[in-house]
Amino acid sequence: MLSKDKFIKGVRYLTTVYINFKIDLEDEFTIQVWYEFFQDLDDDTFTGLLKTYAKQNQYAPQSPASILQLYKEVKQSQLMSAEQAWEIVESNLHKSIRGYQTMVNGNIVSRNDFYQAIKEHTQIVAVCKEIESSLADITTESKKYVRNEFMTIYKRYSEQAVSIGYDERLKLT
């Protein structure tokens, strides 16, 4: 959560960078209104967001939405596509077809092995857990249906990911 101190410093940064950007730092109501738009960001993300905004925009932000739009654009560009996400799932599924427990080169590969292989992709893990029963029963014939189910849910998660307040916040530099 964004500290009020970092928020005030960020607003001062904007008033320094943009000569025509005026915000009354003494007016508690104005500060509170602006703060509410950014309160779900952490300090580093907020600071990086303002610096990135200043580097990319010649003119001062007209509203908090101007800055948040940049946040959403950058975050969206860093998300992998649903197709790329499915490729990661598919490449790890070959190890664990049928109930997440099978023999691969003489070794038992379990559901835990599957999740261990994809653990760095928390959004993919969340989607896989949501469709776990479909993945557990996947066959060559059902693969395209499971893929479609995965893609639909992954796209929904991606849309949620670009909104403020999502657990995995973007660290802009």
Image (cartoon, rainbow, N blue to C red):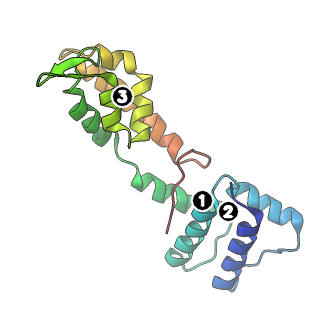
Q: Nearer the viewer, mark 1 or mark 3?
A: 3
Confirm or deny contact between disc 1 and disc 2 (CB under 8 A).
yes
Residues at marks 1 and 3, CA–CA distance in whole angstroms: 29 Å
Quick one: label 1 or label 3, which is nearer the N terminus? 1
Does residue 169 sit above or below 101 in this rendering?
below
Q: Nearer the viewer, mark 3 or mark 2?
A: 3
Q: Nearer the viewer, residue 109 or 171?
A: 109
Considering depth in this image, is 98 or 60 the residue closer to the camera? Answer: 98
Q: Residue at x 56, y 76 (%)?
A: 54
Q: CA distance from mark 1 to mark 2?
A: 6 Å
Residue 79 horizontal/vertical position (percent)? 40, 49
The amino acid marked with disc number 3 is Phe
Residue 37 vs residue 125, the one in the foreground: 125
Quadrant of the rendered image containing residue 121 = top left
Tell me the kind of residue under disc 1. Leu
The residue that label 1 is drawn on is 68
Name the residue that disc number 3 marks.
150
Say which element carries label 3. helix
* Helix, strand or loop under label 1: helix
Tally the numbered discs.
3
Q: Is residue 87 above or below residue 11?
A: above
The image's mark for residue 64 is 2
Percent coordinates x, y for residue 37 in the rendering? 70, 56
- Label 2, secondary structure: give it: helix
Residue at 33% x, 37% y is 118
Q: Residues within 10 Å of mark 2 (few under 14, many from 20)?
A: some
Q: Position of residue 27 (x, y in %)?
A: 88, 70
Residue 66 falls left or right of residue 121: right
Please provide percent x and percent y for residue 143.
24, 21
The dot on residue 51 is none
| Nearer-N-terminus badge (3/2) | 2
